Image: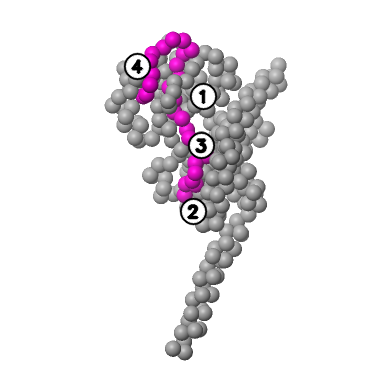
Amino acid sequence: MRCAVPLKSALLALLLATPLAAHAAAAKCDRLIATGGADNPPFLWRDPQNPKRLVGANADLLKKITDSLDLKLDVLYTGDAPKALDQVRSGRVDVLADAVLSPSELAYLDFIHPSITNLQMSAWVRQEPGFLYSNREDLAGRSGIYVTTAGFGSAFDSYAKDNLNLRSVPSLAKALSALLAGKADYVLHERYSLIAYAARQGLLADIQRLDPPVFIRGLHFAVAHDSACNGPWLRGQLAIKMTELRAAGVPQQLLVDNIERWKQQSASTRNSQR
């Protein structure tokens, strides 16, 4: 009985010390390094003024969060989407700024909820009277095109294999060229990504998006399991800030702002080349 009080005191001290120690460990991490796919405006693209950096809606959103947490942030170019993912999986980079949830990646990444936004994979057609469309079943029997690098996920890949007539091309430019030339009935591509490209090329008046989307996937921030910064405090703060920003409509506004930013960069580039 005499040892009960000292034992109880020791246990209480241990319980109190654990969260303090965890917070202290998290506090040592004062800088986050993030990356993502380098050619996906308005979400992320290489900064024309500094090609080692990535800019875009996702970079702006993550900067708002890290500023509120007094963390420094670098959003760096590390290659295309697969290379960026490899850098985060390895723990050399802390955060993947454009992660799409998949069971295989749960072994390497902690996905932050809520998502940044929903990726709306939509069918785009020529701006003319076309076919009736109410859902993706109405695409059956029609010819579709998608960009080779687009990742749809295994569930949709299986559906498309059994139900849709799709072929791939290496770029969005080739996909839209084929569509406008009448060589395909529709292009399957993410909503905001296609708007950014078409706006820059002056093609928005020539195409239209079919609604509802063919399918939807969440786009997330994800923290590497092997990141030295990964801990309960950081994951919790990222989730809290994302919840607040989503409720205020900030991610959506940043997408709109960065479509215009991407378009203006194109105009500046053309002017400088004259």
Residue at 53% over, 53% down: 236
Confirm whether the magenta stretch covers residue 128: yes
Q: Quadrant of the C terminus?
A: top right
- Residue lying at the far left in this picture: please name it: 162
Q: Position of residue 128 (x, y in %)?
A: 46, 10
Q: Amino acid at mark 3?
A: Thr
Above or below — where is 116 with respect to 259? below
Label 3 vs label 2: CA separation? Answer: 25 Å
Q: Amino acid at mark 4?
A: Arg
Q: Nearer the viewer, residue 159 or 148?
A: 159
Label 2 vs label 4: CA separation? Answer: 45 Å
Q: Secondary structure at mark 2?
A: loop
Residue at the disc numbered 1: 194
Residue at the disc numbered 3: 117
Residue at 49% over, 26% down: 191
Residue at the disc numbered 4: 142
Q: Using residue 171 as the reference point, say whether residue 272 is left or right of it.
A: right
Q: Secondary structure at mark 1?
A: helix
Magenta part of the protein: which range? 110-136
Residue at the disc numbered 2: 226
Above or below — where is 60 with respect to 191? below
